[in-house]
Image (tube, helix red, strand yellow):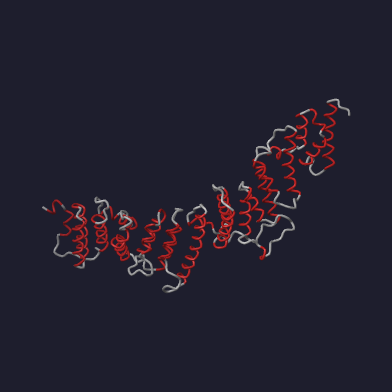
Amino acid sequence: FLYESQPELLKYKSTELSINLVSDWYWKRAEEIEDYSMQVDCALSLVRLGMERNIPGLHSLCDNLVTLETLVYETGCDTTLTLKDLQQMKDIEKLRLLMVNSSEERYVKNAYQWMVPFLHRCENQSPGLANKLLKEYLVTLAKEDLKFPLKIFEHSKPACQQKIISDQDLLMLIALECIYGCKRDDQLSLCYDILECLPQRGYGPETDITNSLHDKVDELEQILSVSELLEKHGLQKPISFVKDTQNCPEEARKLMIRLTRHTGRKQPPVNESYWMGLLQDMLDMQQNVYTCLERDACYEIFTESLLCSSRLENIHLAGQMMHCSIWSIDPPVSVASKGKPQYRVCYEKAIELVLAASREYFNSSANLSDTCMDLARACLQLITDCPPVVQEELDLIRALSYLEEFGMKILPLQVRLCCDRLSLIKECLLQLPSHYKQSAKLLELADLLRVAGDDQTERKGKVLILLVEQALHLQDYK
């Protein structure tokens, strides 16, 4: 009756069973026990009996049943998981499933009890697979949190008796990938803890690969030091950001600008001591990691941010960072102020920075009495020898007071953007018919506005023609 209900068993009805047929029977029977009864332990016992009797081809089935037994009876995983489900999974999925419910307190114990034996089984099936799986598992975990990878590294230190990762080259390789793969910007302390788990140079056999990995660990230390400085100044970034930008001058410049501008916006405002500490940190970042950025650029970015910080004391500090006249030279070491860098931004660049900052303040001002106008003036006054380009900006500020006196209501930015400056003189004359009598003041205003460019004769002629026309219009022939 058995063969009638299950004719597929007929192939086993023989007095001379081949090895393959016996192996096939153990395999099928174990699968049926698990499938029909969900008793993984009974199916596993049958397979082990076959292996004790040297029945070949049962190792992979045995490994899967051992993994399933662990998942069902020990890990607290889904108890409805079947052998068929497990056989369709990739090895990395099995590994994640083994450890998914492990609490922080029991993680290491479970790693030794469940993960390590599973990796050994995988290694026996396919040499090299264990390392590949462990690396993929830890690097994926590290993307969201370094907490659990750290526990694995702590139990793989050179001083550990029973290491989870025994190959020190592999330990360094996985640690580096975990740290650089982490997407979070609040894991710096864990990165340093991982660094402490790695072997020192000179430990164990030295190969070219080992030396290369030690070089990469040294580089990581420098990158972590930069991340620490960024965090110190409130500009947290993932570790990978620093690594990815270390050879890009444009990105390095953007980072330095963000760092200084972020400091300039802090409330309450930071003092001079803090600013000088920031400059030293910038120089350390440039020296240790961002060597693609010129050292001079750090000083220029720093000085520019001081000028643009909207604070008078910072603008004065910027003056100490620049050559403010064409005759200025760097102070000798003996007279350099304690704590102040001796390097100064060159005169040409200083003019460029001062003009950019003052124009920004000028353009954003609502009127002459706006506080931004005082800041614009303070920037320009840093350049002590007052070259023509600086004088022109100062004159434009003075011109605003004349325009106000003549009753003109106009935004400073409108004055700057006015292509025909003579039209501003015309507007002054329209405000009050008698304004034409103030010829000296109107001529001075024309000078301040650079009417007709640098041609003083043409400028005076154009203004006087306007005044005469206005006098004639009012029949004033005197």
Name the one closer to the observer, 58 or 241: 241
Whether residue 445 is situated above or below residue 120 in the rendered picture = above
Give the residue furthest to the left.
1
Name the one closer to the observer, 183 or 354: 354
Residue 411 quadrant: top right
Q: Is residue 459 visible?
A: yes
Give the residue furthest to the top.
475
Q: Residue at x 66, y 62 (%)?
A: 336
Q: Residue at x 13, y 64 (%)?
A: 15
Q: Is residue 458 left or right of residue 113?
A: right
Q: Is residue 183 visible?
A: no
Name the one closer to the observer, 439 or 104: 439
Name the one closer to the observer, 50 or 175: 175
Image coords of residue 478 (percent x, y): 89, 29
Whether residue 2 is situated above or below residue 395 in the rendered picture = below
Q: Residue at x 65, y 47 (%)?
A: 357
Image coords of residue 301 (percent x, y): 61, 54
Image coords of residue 204 (percent x, y): 41, 73
